[in-house]
Image: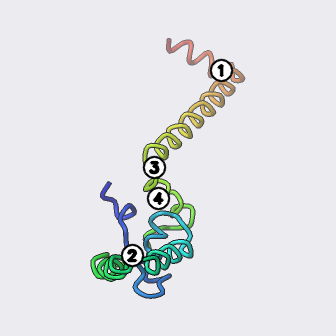
Amino acid sequence: MNSPRTTLYRDKQNAKLMGVCSGIADYTGVNVLWVRLGALILTFGGAAPFTIPGYFLAGLLLNKKPAHLYVDADEQKYWQRVRQSPKRTAREIRSRFRDLDRRLADVETYYVSSNPRLTAEIERLR
């Protein structure tokens, strides 16, 4: 999975400081408020020697999020689901295709059964 949509970025559009928390929120699909609160709790909860340098290191190492990474909010949610559980997303897509295939078969059956000329043509081909 080396698609640009499955990479962690800094989100400078919704950033307060360097965009790390908003990038993590975009990557995971969690509300940015909860990510920022988690970062504050870690910082003031005794993990400051790791949290603060880690935040600035991530801010320096992560690439900036491309401006047009997602077409719309639905695509953004789809890619968040892919990052969270690729197997589940693949199952959902497979299920949707099975449903579409079943519905298309129903339409074909209806059309062929209600069109005697087409039925005769198909029988002649067999």
Q: Which residue is mark 4?
A: 79
Chain-order first, disc 4 or disc 2 = 2
Q: Residue at x 52, y 61 (%)?
A: 75
Which mark is in front, 2 or 1? 2
Alpha-carbon span between mark 4 and mark 3: 10 Å
Q: Give the residue pinned by disc 3.
A: 85
Residue at mark 1:
117
Who's the residue at 56% across and 66% down the image? Answer: 73
Q: Secondary structure at mark 2?
A: helix
Circle 4 or circle 1, nearest the eye: 4
Residue 88 is situated, as x and y percent measured from the top left of the image, at: 49, 44
**Category of crowding for the residue at label 1, using alpha-carbon neighbours closer than 10 angstroms: few (below 14), some (14–19), many (at least 20):** few
For residue 14, above or below residue 82: below
Point out the image quarter for the N terminus. Answer: bottom left
Please indicate whether residue 28 sits to the left or right of residue 54 in the image: right
Residue named by callout 2:
47
Residue at the farthest right position: 114
Closer to us: mark 4 or mark 2?
Answer: 2
- Residue 100 visible in the snapshot: yes
Name the amino acid type tagged 1.
Arg
Within 10 Å of disc 2 (Cα), the crowding (few <14, some 14-19, many 20+) is few
**Mark 3 or 1: the one toward you:** 3
Depth order, front residue of 61/108: 61
Q: Quadrant of residue 47?
A: bottom left
